[in-house]
Amino acid sequence: MNEIACKLQQEAQRIASKHALPGFYTRFKAPLALAKRLFYNHPGAVRLRGIVEPIYNEALGHGLFHSTRVSIDCAALIHIETEGNHLDPPEIERLMVLGTYCGLLHDISREEQNHAQRGAEKAKSLLCGFSLSGEEISCVSEAIRNHEAFAPPTPSGRQWAQLVSDCLYDADKFRWGADIFTHMLWHIMDYQGIGPQELIEKFPWGMSGAASIIETFRTPTGRQFGPEIVENGMEIGKEIYRYLLEHFKEG
Ligand SMILES: [Fe+2]
Ligand SMILES: [Fe+2]
């Protein structure tokens, strides 16, 4: 990463560290810990991580860091949303594993046009060698096809698959909070050769996009806790914008 992007990332991380963690990350520590354990220890997840790692390009801002965060939040959301559903623990774990796979694979075609559709197709072929049923592979693939913001999702005929799809969407949009400023934006800035002046110009547009994502959460937990995550990111964004104006505004 270039020097300016690196410096801005450090500044954003310093600003973010002064902000309290959003409620989702303090209230749901147990499901998040379970999701993390699955992500790092489940044999299928470990294997899939090994497959996707060389494919993801961190420079795009949607690399393995992003996918890891989405996977863990997606599996945690599935756990939270299935509470009280009278599902057996192994059934819940199975869905959490599917959520983990969704997170790992959802941006696999990020560099291609129509990346959600392309990613859905690629996920299908990558998961062929895994011990999953045809329905489970379709579930992951459909969730990936539906993860794009401001695009109408295709409803699933199966309640459990719908849940996985909605949890992937919300976990991905949780990244429109602090993660944009602590990680993603600076990689994108560096990769696309965006200078601080251009960033200043584009900033208000980016912030309004983040604001509009608040209305789109799909699960009850996402609707309840997602807005705070995004607003927390916007607060960090406002501070980094002021920093940009102070240090880089010309004229
Ligand atoms: Fe995506
Ligand atoms: Fe994503």
Image (cartoon, rainbow, N blue to C red):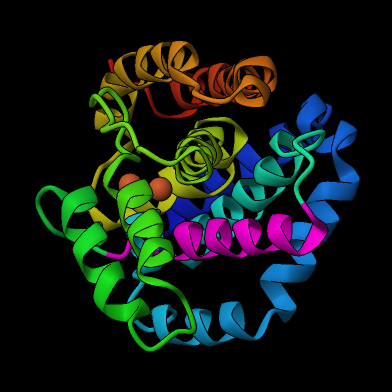
Q: Please report the residue visible at 13 percent of the width from the left and 47 percent of the height from the top.
A: 114
For the N terminus, the quadrant is bottom left
Residue 106 visible in the shown view? no
Answer above or below: position of 183 versus 135.
Answer: above
Q: Which image quadrant: the C terminus?
A: top left
| Nearer the observer, 202 or 161 | 161
Residue furthest left in the image: 113
Asked if the magenta segment contains residue 100, the reply would be yes
Is residue 117 toward the left or the right of residue 91 in the image? left
Q: Quadrant location of residue 141?
A: bottom left
Q: Position of residue 5 (x, y in %)?
A: 44, 50
The answer to whether 10 appears left or right of 245 in the picture is right
Looking at the image, residue 143 lies above or below residue 251: below
Give residue 207's position: percent from left, percent from top.
41, 17
Determine the image quadrant of residue 54.
Answer: bottom left
Question: Would residue 150 be counted in the magenta stretch?
Answer: no
Does residue 138 lie above or below 178 as drawn? below
Whole-percent x and y of residue 90?
76, 64
Q: Main secondary structure of the magenta part?
A: helix
Which residue is painted at 31% across and 79% down in the image?
126
Q: Quadrant of residue 203?
A: top left
Relative image position of residue 175 (x, y in whole percent): 53, 38
Please provide the residue range marked out in magenta. 88-108
Counting labels gives 0
The answer to whether residue 227 of the structure is visible from this angle is yes
Residue at 81 percent of width and 58 percent of height: 89
Q: Nearer the viewer, residue 186 or 77?
A: 77
